[in-house]
Structures are given as structure tokens and as C-alpha cells.
Amino acid sequence: MESLSNKRKVLIQKPLNFWERIYLPAIVKGLSITMSHFFRKPVTIQYPEQKREFSENFRGMHSLKRDEEGRERCTACGLCALSCPAEAISMIAAERKKGEENLYREEKYAAVYEINMLRCIFCGLCEEACPKEAIYLDGDIVPSEYLRKDFIYGKDKLVEAPLNQ
Ligand code: SF4
Ligand code: SF4
């Protein structure tokens, strides 16, 4: 059997011609590519001063919606948390008390509702699972933070502002 070393081919380096030895054509070619890019419209933008328009399908930060009377729609049913593949949502349900009918739409509401934005993959499954049309990923991009704890968004950041604000 032919040994492996016998099968290897030795590459013989082709000797450089005159133009290759003086490098000038290669330099001119390189410069021409640089110059052709120099006069093209730049693809970069001055973020954050300039922002690109998002597509219609863009999924941004979540918002917990209110109904037409300004009451929180979420009933803390937990379906969004159950459907979340990243286990990013947690909540604590509470019973609506007498006199709170103008705050919460139904008898149960989320006293605590948190989304860990570091876990979230913005898949939109929570939005699809919600039977109350209470959660939508229609916000902006999640801003950067220095501390991990600041990526846990509570109701203060998630619930829509009241109607009269
Ligand atoms: S968008 Fe997806 S990953 Fe993010 S909270 Fe909703 S279900 Fe979870
Ligand atoms: S956001 Fe929707 S699915 Fe999630 S707990 Fe509230 S009502 Fe249920």
C-alpha cells in the first residue's frame, strides 16, 4: 500500500514576475478598491443620535395594556409565563378589592409582574398566549444597563401609562 507521505504533493512556489516583485499593481488595485468604497453611501449610522426605522414585525419591549377605561387588562392567569420558553416571566396574582374596579378589569390582577429582559428572546409567544390582549411587544429596544438587576422589569416599566397622562 502506498504510504500517506508518498501521496502528498509538494507545492512549488511560482517565481514572482517583475510587476509582482515591485508590488505597484497590487497597491494600485488595493487603493482603487478603497477609493470605490470611499465615494459610496455609508451603511453605518450615528447611533444613538440617528436611529433606523424598525420593520413592522419588530418585537421590542413588552407593554402591559389597559382597556378603554384605563383599567389593567392582565388577570394574572399565568398563560404568558407558561408559554415562555425562556422562563423570563414571573408574577404574583392578587384578588381585586372593593373599590378597585376602576383599576383592574377583572377580579384577579397581577400584583407583581416581572420580565427578565436578559432571558427574554423576544419570540412573542407571551403575546400570542394572552387571552386578554394584555401584553404586546410593541415598545422600543431594551436600553443597556450596567447591572443585571436593572434588566428585571416590573410593572412600573411594563404597564402602559394611565389614560389621563
Ligand atoms: S417574548 Fe418570548 S421569551 Fe420574551 S417573555 Fe415573551 S415568551 Fe418569553
Ligand atoms: S399578560 Fe395575559 S397571559 Fe399573561 S398573565 Fe396577564 S392576562 Fe394572563
Image (cartoon, rainbow, N blue to C red):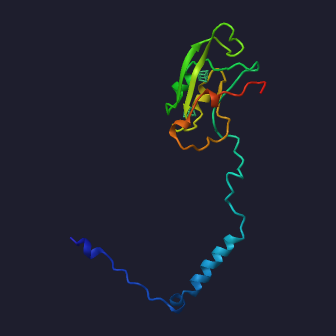
Nearest to the observer: residue 95 or residue 19: 95
| Residue displayed at 72% across by 64% down | 41
Nearest to the observer: residue 59 or residue 151: 151
Ligand 1 is in which quadrant of the figure? top right
Coordinates of residue 24 in the picture (x, y in percent)? 58, 87
Can you name the residue that lies furthest to the front here?
146
| Residue displayed at 58% across by 19% down | 111
Reply above or below: 18 against 6.
below
Residue 37 image-quadrant placement: bottom right
Reply above or below: 127 against 52.
above
Can you name the residue that lies furthest to the bottom here?
18
| Residue displayed at 57% across by 25% down | 113
Residue 138 image-quadrant placement: top right
Reply above or below: 153 against 104.
below
Coordinates of residue 128 in the picture (x, y in percent)? 61, 28
Can you name the residue that lies furthest to the top here?
98
Coordinates of residue 16 in the picture (x, y in percent)? 47, 88
Position of the C terminus by quadrant = top right
Q: In this view, does 84 lie to the left or right of 56?
A: left
Can you name the residue that lies furthest to the right here?
164
Position of the N terminus by quadrant = bottom left
Q: How many labels does the image show?
A: 0
Coordinates of residue 127 in the picture (x, y in percent)? 62, 29
Residue 43 image-quadrant placement: bottom right
| Residue displayed at 25% across by 74% down | 5
